C-alpha cells in the first residue's frame, strides 16, 4: 500500500524537440495512444498515492489550466504560474514551494516520461534510507550522467559530450554513472532549501550542493519499459507500438 504523498509534474517546458506538434499546444497536451501526456502523468502519480498535485505552466499555459479544469481528478490540483518567465528545473520547483504541503514527501514526475517503474518500491527505499532526495536512475546510454559512490549516494555529474564534470566535493574514483529517469521522491523541505532568486536555474547543481551534507540517493530501476517522450521520432515509434500492442504502460 503506497503511503500518502503529494506530487509535482513539471509541465512548463517549450517542447522544442516535439515541434511542430508544440507550435500550437504545450508538450503536456501532446497525445499518445489517444491520451495526453499530462493526463497520463496525473493518473500515474495519483495511483502511487498522490492526493495533492502541483503543475507548473509557461508555454501555452492557458491550455493546461483549461484542460485541468475540464476534468475531474481524484486529487487536488494546483497551478504554479511561470507565464512571466520560464524558471528551469530548480527555479520552477522553488517557485512552486508555497503550493506544497509541509509534511508529505513530493513525487516529482516529468510530464514526458512514461514508465512501469515501481513507485511503491521507490517510496519504501526513500523512507528506509532517510534520504532527502531519491532519484530514479538506470544504467542506460545518456549524454549526461549522474555519478554515485559505492553507497549509492550522489557525488557528481558528467556531461559526456563536453567531458565536463561537477562534483559535490572532491572527485570520486570509480563512481558509477547512471542516467536520470525524470522521476524523484523528495522531502517536503527540499523546495525551500533551493535558492530564492527570480533567475532561472537547473536543479542538478543544487542537488550536488546539498549532497555535501545530506543524503541524495539512487533508486536503480530496469531501463526496460521506460521512455522519455521528448522527441518527435520517439513519439511516432510509441504510437506504432500502441496501435500494435495496446497501452503497455497502463
Image: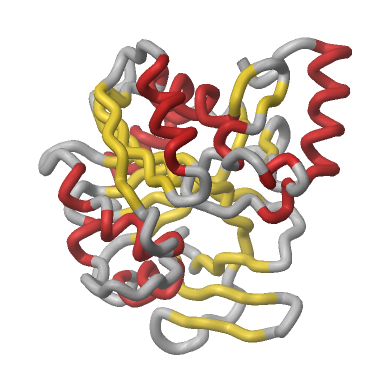
Residue appearing at x 31%, y 61% in the figure: 215
Q: Is residue 153 visible?
A: no
Does 82 appear above or below 206?
above
Residue appearing at x 40%, y 79% in the figure: 168
Report the side of 145 relative to 148 (left or right). Answer: right
Residue 237 appears at what percent x and percent y? 86, 32
127 vs 142, nearest the viewer: 142
Residue appearing at x 72%, y 67% in the figure: 143
Taking the view exactly as shown, the residue that stands out farthest to the left is: 102
Q: Quadrant of residue 142?
A: bottom right
Does 93 appear above or below 158?
above
Q: Quadrant of the N terminus?
A: top left
Report the side of 245 relative to 54 (left or right). Answer: right
Residue 66 appears at what percent x and percent y? 42, 27
Image colouring: secondary structure
Q: Is residue 181 visible?
A: yes
Q: Quadrant of the C terminus?
A: top right
Report the side of 49 relative to 16 (left or right). Answer: left
Figure label count:
0
Does 186 appear above or below 242?
below
Residue 114 appears at what percent x and percent y? 62, 32
Residue 181 appears at what percent x and percent y? 58, 48
Residue appearing at x 63%, y 85% in the figure: 164
Amino acid at each position: 500500500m503506497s503511503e500518502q504523498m503529494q506530487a509535482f509534474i513539471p509541465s512548463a517546458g517549450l517542447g522544442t524537440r516535439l515541434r511542430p506538434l508544440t507550435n500550437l499546444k504545450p508538450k503536456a497536451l501532446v497525445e499518445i495512444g489517444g491520451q495526453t501526456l499530462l493526463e497520463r502523468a496525473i493518473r500515474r502519480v495519483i495511483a502511487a498515492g498522490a492526493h495533492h498535485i502541483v503543475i507548473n505552466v509557461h508555454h501555452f499555459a492557458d491550455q493546461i489550466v483549461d484542460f485541468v479544469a475540464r476534468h475531474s481528478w481524484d486529487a487536488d490540483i494546483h497551478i504554479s504560474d511561470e507565464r512571466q518567465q520560464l524558471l528551469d528545473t530548480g527555479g520552477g520547483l522553488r517557485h512552486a514551494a508555497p503550493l506544497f504541503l509541509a509534511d508529505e514527501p513530493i513525487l516529482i514526475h516529468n510530464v514526458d516520461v512514461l514508465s512501469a517503474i515501481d513507485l511503491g518500491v521507490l517510496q519504501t527505499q526513500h523512507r528506509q534510507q532517510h534520504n532527502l532526495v531519491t532519484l530514479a536512475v538506470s544504467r542506460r546510454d545518456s549524454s549526461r550522467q549522474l555519478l554515485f559512490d559505492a553507497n549509492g549516494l550522489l557525488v557528481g555529474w558528467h556531461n559526456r559530450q563536453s567531458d565536463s564534470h561537477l562534483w559535490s566535493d572532491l572527485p570520486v574514483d570509480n563512481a558509477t554513472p547512471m542516467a536520470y529517469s525524470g522521476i524523484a521522491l523528495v522531502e517536503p523541505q527540499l523546495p525551500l532549501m533551493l535558492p530564492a532568486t527570480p533567475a532561472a536555474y537547473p536543479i542538478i547543481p543544487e542537488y550536488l550542493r546539498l549532497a555535501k551534507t545530506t543524503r541524495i540517493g539512487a533508486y536503480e530501476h530496469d531501463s526496460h519499459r521506460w521512455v522519455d517522450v521528448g522527441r518527435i521520432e520517439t513519439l511516432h515509434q510509441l504510437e506504432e507500438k500502441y496501435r500494435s500492442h495496446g497501452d503497455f504502460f497502463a
